[in-house]
Image (cartoon, rainbow, N blue to C red):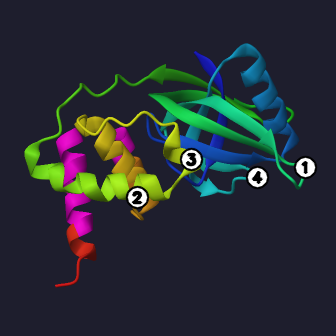
Amino acid sequence: MQIPLFPLNTVLFPWGPLPLRIFEPRYIDMVGRCMKETTPFGVLLIREGHEAGPATVHEVGTLAEISDWYQGSDGLLGITAVGGQRFRLVSSERQSDGLNIGEIEPVPPEPDMPLPAAYARMLPLLEHVLDDLGKLYESLERRYDDAVWVSYRLMEILPIDLEEKQESLVSSDTLGRLRRIEQFLASQTPA
């Protein structure tokens, strides 16, 4: 499967929202095609380089589907995308307009898992933060009984290092991700 790639300094997790302001012609064209053809684009964390220039990326990313768009008061295109399935980048090529196109293979989704009781104490924090984040998360289906969903949401909203977020995206170890979140939260609590 070939898709357009959008290298970013963020990690998009499945079912997570991604607000973007689009100003480069290559991405304006990409968004137009994705909306017209109802196709996703791929979001990959930048390993080296910049969002507005050449960049090398990590090999595992997330498909993104555009769920909303608007024109900002500054005239720039704004979109909100939602994370879909994870994928592995097999190869990529840069088009003459600067847009990267990638050959990808899907990464199997993590199996459903009920949230273990030992991690239920994370839920009030997650609920509170999602409510505070407002519009970006208000239309998101909330699945507090699903350990995979809960772990993805906590990884995306907590101020965890991007490389650690990327490792969590690559891994299909839901319990390991929950343990990492628990360790992070414990390290933030005053003794």
Can I make out residue 95 in this image? no
Q: Mark 3 or mark 2: which comes first in sequence?
A: 2
Q: Mark 2 or mark 1: which comes first in sequence?
A: 1
Question: Mark 3 belongs to which amino acid?
Answer: Leu
Q: Mark 4 or mark 3: which comes first in sequence?
A: 4
State which quadrant residue 69 falls in: top right
| Span colored in magenta | 167-185
- Mark nearest the camera among 2 and 1 is 2
Q: Mark 4 or mark 1: which comes first in sequence?
A: 4
Residue 81 location in percent, x, y?
A: 61, 36
Q: Is residue 173 above or below residue 37?
A: below
The residue pinned by badge 2 equals: 129
The residue pinned by badge 3 equals: 136
Q: CA distance from mark 3 to mark 2?
A: 12 Å
Q: Which mark is residue 7?
A: none
Depth order, front residue of 132/5: 132
Q: CA distance from mark 3 to mark 1?
A: 21 Å
Q: Residues within 10 Å of mark 2 (few under 14, many from 20)?
A: some
The residue pinned by badge 4 equals: 53
- Mark nearest the camera among 4 and 3 is 3
Q: Mark 2 or mark 4: which comes first in sequence?
A: 4
- Mark nearest the camera among 4 and 1 is 1
SS at circle 1: loop
- Mark nearest the camera among 2 and 4 is 2
Q: Residues within 10 Å of mark 1 (few under 14, many from 20)?
A: few
Is the Cβ of the residue at disc 2 closer than 8 Å to that at disc 4? no
State which quadrant residue 85 falls in: top left
The residue positioned 71% from the left and 40% from the top of the image is 79
Q: Is residue 161 above or below residue 136?
A: below
SS at circle 3: helix
Q: Which mark is residue 75?
A: 1
